[in-house]
Image (cartoon, rainbow, N blue to C red):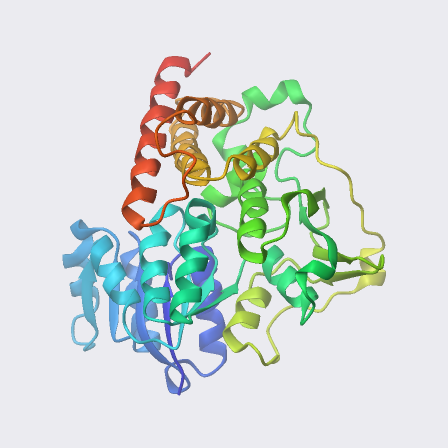
Amino acid sequence: MRSVTVLGATGSIGESAFDLLMRSGGAEAWRVMALTGGANIARLAEMARALRSEIAVTAYPEHLDDLRDALAGSGIASAAGPAAIVEAADMPADWTLSAIVGAAGLPPGLRVLERGGTLALANKESLVTAGRLVMGTAERTGARILPVDSEHSAIFQALGADNIEDVSSVSITASGGAFRDWPMERLAQATVAEASTHPNWAMGQRITIDSASMFNKALEVIETREFFGIDPERIKVLVHPESIVHAFVTHRDGGNIAHLGSPDMRHAIGYALHWPKRIDLPVAPMDLASIGSLTFRAPDEERWPALRLARQVIAAGGAAGAVLNGAKEQALDDFIAGRIRFPDMARAVEATLDDLTGRAGFTTSPSDLATVLDWDQQARQIAAGWAARHGGR
């Protein structure tokens, strides 16, 4: 019986993973070491009971008593706080899904790699903020990282046994999010509710807004660079409104291998869960005749400046990824709270990068978690200050 841990079980990715585990035998087929979640205590406890998890952990210490009450009589242990989540990641699971949103996913993910485990990585921020540290740790310990982002899972599958040096380019697709066809002048009036509605995918609020701003895709460009080691000029982005082609690989001989599938994260999660085998998954089959046509267009970097910032970060190297992500997370908080407008998020991130670029150590890639988190905090502080000065304009 394989053992599994799900970090971020109550988010959209975690819910899809729970569905797959339950459909493939649940507690009778899997030994669930740990489930972690946020403030949705009732759902976390329900999942833990259904899968008979050894422990359930909430990120918020103030909810620990509620979690204990919800698990009373089950025999399932409970804990709370970021340190407890890292301890849960250290439990000897064969397979751990990292589905925590944001930089908070880096410490537990690193702990999985330190113990040489298999990390199914849906937390793109880990590679954005600390790509060399993450990949270097996996190489040193013999740990395995399996990509769970749909685009990177698609590249991984399309590459197969091919050498990355035989690849001319890789292309990842973007739906364009909620505002892909809006007039540019209307973006400044975009509301949080409007940005939180995705045309194709069912995702959490934060990643849905990141899709609308294209910051999600910007992070994925950096993630592609870090995970596959491909030169940045060979990484392309295409706007593909249908969200059917998730990525394609162009080989040196001119041939293209594309990965097509319905916009359902259970494919990428299920592929990583059962890799290297393929099994039946509860994903709707595609009817290409019904779809009729697939369309693609180049992204407009005036509309989506996040893509330009991603290229800037890759060129800068060092701590630039940690700075971009920290500033982006703070700017997203400020937009959700109504302190800045939708286009201001990119402006806040760019201003933060400009501010920190000349700081001592910026050009050196972080070699430990403490350094990554220090840059993250500096970026958040500067982005928050920018929002305080420019919000509402």
| Vertical comparison of 233 with 63: above or below | above
Front in this rendered view, residue 235 or 268: 235
* Relative height, residue 211 to residue 74 (above, below): above
Q: Is residue 122 left or right of residue 41?
A: right
Indicate the quadrant where residue 213 lies: top right
Q: Quadrant of residue 76?
A: bottom left
The furthest residue to the left? 65
Q: Is residue 207 visible?
A: yes
Q: Which quadrant of the structure image shows residue 363? A: top left
Q: Residue at x 42, y 30 (%)?
A: 331
Residue at horizontal 52 percent and vertical 27 percent from the top: 346
Q: Judge by depth and name the residue closer to the eye, 341 or 256.
A: 256
Residue at image point 16% right, 76% down: 73
Find residue 163 and report its horizontal and vertical position in percent: 68, 65
Q: Looking at this view, is 137 or 209 the one in front?
A: 137
Question: Relative to 113, does residue 50 appear above or below in the rendering?
Answer: below
Say left or right for 277 vs 21. right
Using residue 351 as the reference point, say whether residue 175 is left or right of it: right
Q: Position of residue 3 (x, y in %)?
A: 37, 80
Question: What percent of the width, then of the height, locates residue 162?
Answer: 70, 68
Identified at 57% across, 71% down, the residue is: 271
State whether residue 99 appears in this view: no
